Image (spheres, rainbow, N blue to C red):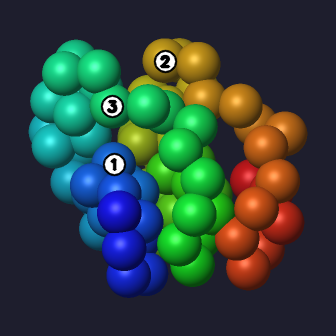
């Protein structure tokens, strides 16, 4: 945890790496981890326009109302 992303799931989500997001989630990555510039993985994917990742994160239980990051919430 450090830098702009705070965790690997947030980094992969912001960059549009759907396969990596799936692997991380399947390996137990905490979907609602907060921190970094975007706040969490859902906010990162939303801001960067990665619709497939947004849908995946929501399907896997991401909290759409979670606050944090520069933009507040997704």
- Would you say 17 lies left or right of 4 here? left
Mark before the other along the chain sequence, 2 or 1? 1
* Residue drawn at x 73%, y 79% as measured from the top left: 70
- CA neighbours of label 2 inside 10 A, class few (<14), some (14 to 19), many (20+): few
Mark before the other along the chain sequence, 1 or 3? 1
The residue carrying mark 2 is 60
Task: Give the CA separation, mark 3 to mark 2.
Answer: 11 Å
Q: Say which element carries label 2.
A: loop
- Would you say 19 lies left or right of 2 here? left
Residue toward you, 53 or 36 = 36
Confirm whether residue 14 shows in the render.
Answer: no
Quarter location, residue 6: bottom left
Mark 2 or 1, which is nearer the eye?
1
The residue carrying mark 3 is 29
* Residue drawn at x 61%, y 29% as measured from the top left: 62
Mark before the other along the chain sequence, 3 or 2? 3
- Residue 4 coordinates in the image, percent (x, y): 43, 81
Confirm whether residue 38 shows in the render.
Answer: yes
Task: Give the CA separation, mark 1 to mark 3.
Answer: 7 Å
Relative height, residue 24 to residue 48 (above, below) = above
* Residue drawn at x 57%, y 78% as measured from the top left: 37
Which label was assigned to residue 9?
A: 1
* Residue drawn at x 76%, y 37% as measured from the top left: 64
Q: Say which element carries label 3.
A: loop
- Residue 48 coordinates in the image, percent (x, y): 50, 70
Q: Say which element carries label 1.
A: helix
Task: Give the CA separation, mark 2 to mark 1.
Answer: 13 Å
- Would you say 14 lies left or right of 34 here? left
- Would you say 37 lies left or right of 2 here? right
Q: Are marks 1 and 3 in contact (CB under 8 Å)?
A: yes
């Amino acid at each position: 945890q450090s830098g702009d992303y705070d965790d690997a799931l947030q980094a992969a989500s912001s960059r549009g790496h759907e396969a990596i997001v799936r692997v991380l989630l399947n390996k137990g990555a905490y979907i609602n981890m907060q921190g970094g510039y975007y706040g969490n993985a859902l906010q990162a994917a939303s801001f960067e326009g990665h619709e497939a990742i947004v849908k995946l994160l929501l399907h896997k239980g991401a909290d759409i109302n979670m606050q944090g990051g520069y933009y507040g919430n997704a």
